[in-house]
Amino acid sequence: MALNREPATRWAWIEIDQGALRRNTRAFKNLLGPRQRLCCVVKADAYGHGAVECAKIMYATGADMFAVATVREGVALREGGIKAPILLLSEPPIEAADTLLAHQIMPSIYTAEFALAYGERAVSAGVVGKYHMAIETGMNRIGVHHTEVVEFRRSVEFHRGIACDGVFTHFATADEPDGWDYKLQCRRFEEAVTAMQEARFPCGIVHCDNTPASILDPSTHFDMIRAGIGLYGLQPAERTAPVFPLDPVMSVRARVTRVTHPAIGEGVGYGFTYRVPRARVQICTLPVGYADGLSRTLSNRMDVLFRGSRVQQVGNICMDQFMVAITETSKRQMPEAEIGDAMTIIGRDGDEQITADEHARLRGTINYEVVCDFGLRLERVYR
Ligand SMILES: *Cc1c(COP(=O)(O)O)cnc(C)c1O
């Protein structure tokens, strides 16, 4: 890939570890039998990791299908040269039907209105529109209710413009596969699939597992798993970490754009939420801000890595920049930074590491949101 150099125009970037992405993809592939498929979820620009670039690497490592959240994400994959089947994980407006057909993006369907309109557009285009039927089994988000699947199929199946390529559901509590809620969703899904099969409606590819279910419950792999977060090397739950090691794919780094030694009592950043507490504190500026996904809620609470050690972020994080303070402590003689020195916001430096999970804990959110947010504006380097 030609995108392996630091961006020329900004001292801040995301590093994508291609080797880690390959290893994680292979780990999911290895959970499966020869007839089972791996659907790689690359919605939200591959959770901030770059959908087209990641999809190419995943495809070369055994991905069979890709899943996206929006029609535009699907079109971007096609325009980026991805030829594998693409599944849209929800039902878009009817007006999107022609775009789906033109790019062979399979919608998830759960209303007869959409199914029939999509079929009409397919007939006009002289093609058959494949789709996957979403089944509501308890999350109460999308899908045909699990007790109404046969009636639904009866109301759309006659249409020659559409063909069911798969049926699926989604778990609300896959991180607890021993719990009643998970088991109830499994039972409802299996009963719905059996009911359709008995009524002679073909189901195609049967699938339900996201990352945690794929790892924790092989009994629900069926014909395909839909892995997302794990491909990017992040754990979906505490209990998956010991049983399924993964390599984080994203690092976030920046170079110091300015250094200064303000006098004691001087404030730093908007609102002076930090004041220089003593002599010989070096304040360094880094060109990453909340518009790059570095949440302002981390202000005065996060660390970054500099030459293998933690240094404290200080002052309110700005839209496009933030500051850190390098102070000598009795324990360590901190070397001062110079303009152009690299610092690590997410990732490893020597023996120290700052993970997306650490940011998630500080922010009161999940690692999924942390990496998605960094995808907002930073350029990516693939190494
Ligand atoms: C996002 C999503 C996935 C992937 O979930 P992970 O927890 O990231 O593996 C799978 N299926 C559906 C329907 C999704 O929306």
Image (tube, helix red, strand yellow):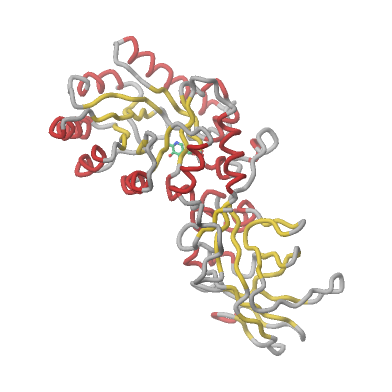
Q: In which quarter of the image is residue 313?
A: bottom right
Q: Nearer the viewer, residue 27 or 305?
A: 27
Looking at the rendered structure, the number of numbered marks drawn on it comes to 0
Q: Residue furthest top?
A: 198
Q: Which residue lies furthest to the left in this view?
A: 124
Q: Residue at point 37% right, 25% down?
A: 167
Q: Residue at point 70% right, 90% down?
A: 263
Relative side of 329 to 3, left or right: right
- How far across and how far down the image is residue 364, in percent? 57, 55
Relative side of 50 to 122, left or right: right
Q: Which of 76 and 2 is in front in this view?
A: 2
Q: Residue at point 34% right, 47% down?
A: 79
Is 131 located above or below residue 251 in the figure?
above
Is 37 located above or below residue 199 in the figure?
below
- How far across and how far down the image is residue 316, in percent? 57, 74
Q: Residue at point 45% right, 31% down?
A: 64
Relative side of 120 to 269, left or right: left
- How far across and how far down the image is residue 65, in percent? 42, 33
Relative side of 334 to 283, left or right: right
Q: In which quarter of the image is residue 78?
A: top left
Q: Which of 144 and 101 is in front in this view?
A: 101
Q: Which residue lies furthest to the front in this view?
A: 2
- How far across and how far down the image is residue 340, in percent? 64, 75
Is 154 located above or below residue 49 in the figure?
above
Q: Which residue lies furthest to the bottom in this view?
A: 263
